[in-house]
Image (tube, helix red, strand yellow):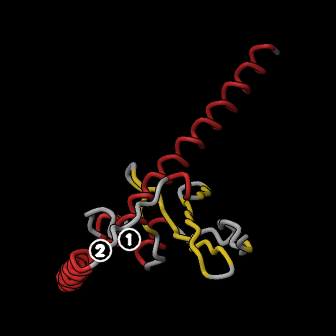
Amino acid sequence: MKRISLVLVTLLLLSVVGCSMAEKRLSARAVEYYNYLTGANSLTGEKFDSPAKRNSLTPEAEKARRKIAEELERARIEVREKSEATPKEISADLIEVSINGRFGVSAVPYMIEPAIVRAQVRWVWDRGQWYLYTSSEAEIEKYGEFPSDLTIDNASEETK
């Protein structure tokens, strides 16, 4: 009996640690993504596309996507050069995450007076990395439907 209890306690601890590690990895990935969006880092957007989505693109679609990405990057650089403000980096302590199996969601609060809103981003775990989940046909086929109950409470908080 003692041995069964010890095994159960060990399994419980491993699941808690594993969940914590998965949340930390998702939070770190979300930091990269949000900082990419704000221009605080020099990553490219395609780095965040899931393997299923990337593999489903035709050569023509891939070429068009790369052209759009290059134009967006030029525009981001131009805005950064003309702006006197430095993009504010988002840190992990601002990000909320929730995970259900291979799916995750992240949110970072931002101000829309008089409330704080959390814009949620969907993620999928594949090949040892978190990727954006856009519900493309290829993603649904490979990973399945995104769990409808996987959200972060999006209720607005009144600002003080």
**Residue 29's quadrant in the figure?**
bottom left
Residue 15 lies left or right of residue 123; in this view the side is right
Residue positioned 66% across, 65% down in the render = 152
Check disc 1 and report the residue beneath it: 38
Of mark 1 and mark 2, the one earlier in the sequence is 1
Residue sitting nearer the eye, 49 or 73: 73
Q: Quadrant of the C terminus?
A: bottom right
Q: Quadrant of the N terminus?
A: top right
The location of residue 87, given as percent across then percent down, is 36, 68
Neighbour class for label 2 at 10 Å: few (<14), some, many (≥20)? few
Relative to residue 78, is residue 127 depicted above or below?
above
Give the amino acid at mark 2.
Answer: Glu
Residue positioned 26% across, 68% down in the render = 44
Check disc 2 and report the residue beneath it: 84
Residue sitting nearer the eye, 145 or 30: 30
Residue positioned 61% across, 32% down in the render = 14
Residue 114 lies left or right of residue 62; in this view the side is right
Secondary element under disc 2, as helix, strand or loop, is loop
**Residue 40's quadrant in the figure?**
bottom left
State the CA–CA distance, disc 1 to disc 2.
14 Å
Neighbour class for label 1 at 10 Å: few (<14), some, many (≥20)? some
Residue 98 lies left or right of residue 124; in this view the side is right
The location of residue 93, given as percent across then percent down, is 55, 52
The location of residue 56, given as percent across then percent down, is 31, 75
Residue 2 lies left or right of residue 42; in this view the side is right
Residue sitting farthest toward the front:
84
The location of residue 154, given as percent across then percent down, is 68, 72
Secondary element under disc 1, as helix, strand or loop, is helix
Give the amino acid at mark 1.
Answer: Thr
> Does residue 93 appear in the picture of this structure?
yes
